[in-house]
Amino acid sequence: MGHDLIGLHELEIRKEKGAFSSLFTSRQHKHAFLDELTGIIEASNFVLISCVIDKASLREKQGPVHNPYHVALGFCLETLYEFLQEKNQ
């Protein structure tokens, strides 16, 4: 890919878009990539912090001023802060 700043966005991998548009040379190559990625995730010890924003509801309640991704990031950062406090870190 030429650099190490690739986000592993499920939609882009699945639909072979963005950085993944020319990565896979065959279906077997794509499946091998997904199998290896799955193995890395299964072997890793990590905590996942995520947030779901209902963009339509947010737009109805707060108007188009609020960026839903910024709102989600704010919630995730708050959760991360609380998690780190809990771990005394």
Image (cartoon, rainbow, N blue to C red):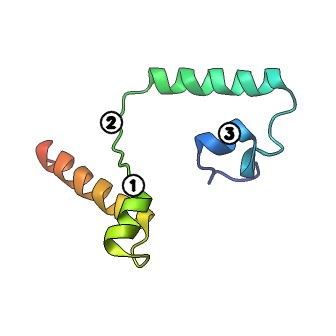
Residue, x 43% and y 61% (percent of image)?
56
Q: CA distance from mark 2 to mark 3?
A: 22 Å
Viewer-side residue, 41 vs 68: 68
Q: Residue 67, percent across and down?
A: 43, 70
Q: Which residue is mark 2?
A: 47
Tell me where residue 14 sits by quadrant: top right
As drawn, the residue found furthest toward the front would be: 60
Q: Which residue is mark 3?
A: 13
Tell me where residue 75 sits by quadrant: bottom left
Residue, x 20% and y 46% (percent of image)?
83
* Dot 1 alpha-carbon crowd within 10 angstroms: few under 14, some 14 to 19, many 20 or more: few
Residue 10 in the image: above or below residue 61 = above
* Dot 3 alpha-carbon crowd within 10 angstroms: few under 14, some 14 to 19, many 20 or more: some
Give amino acid for label 3.
Answer: Ile
Q: Which residue is mark 1?
A: 54
Is the residue under label 3 in contact with that under label 2 (CB below 8 Å)?
no
Q: Residue 23, percent across and down?
A: 80, 40
Which mark lies nearer to you, 2 or 3?
3
Give amino acid for label 1.
Answer: Asp
Q: Earlier in the sequence, mark 2 or mark 1?
A: 2
Q: Earlier in the sequence, mark 2 or mark 3?
A: 3
Secondary structure state at the residue bearing disc 3: helix
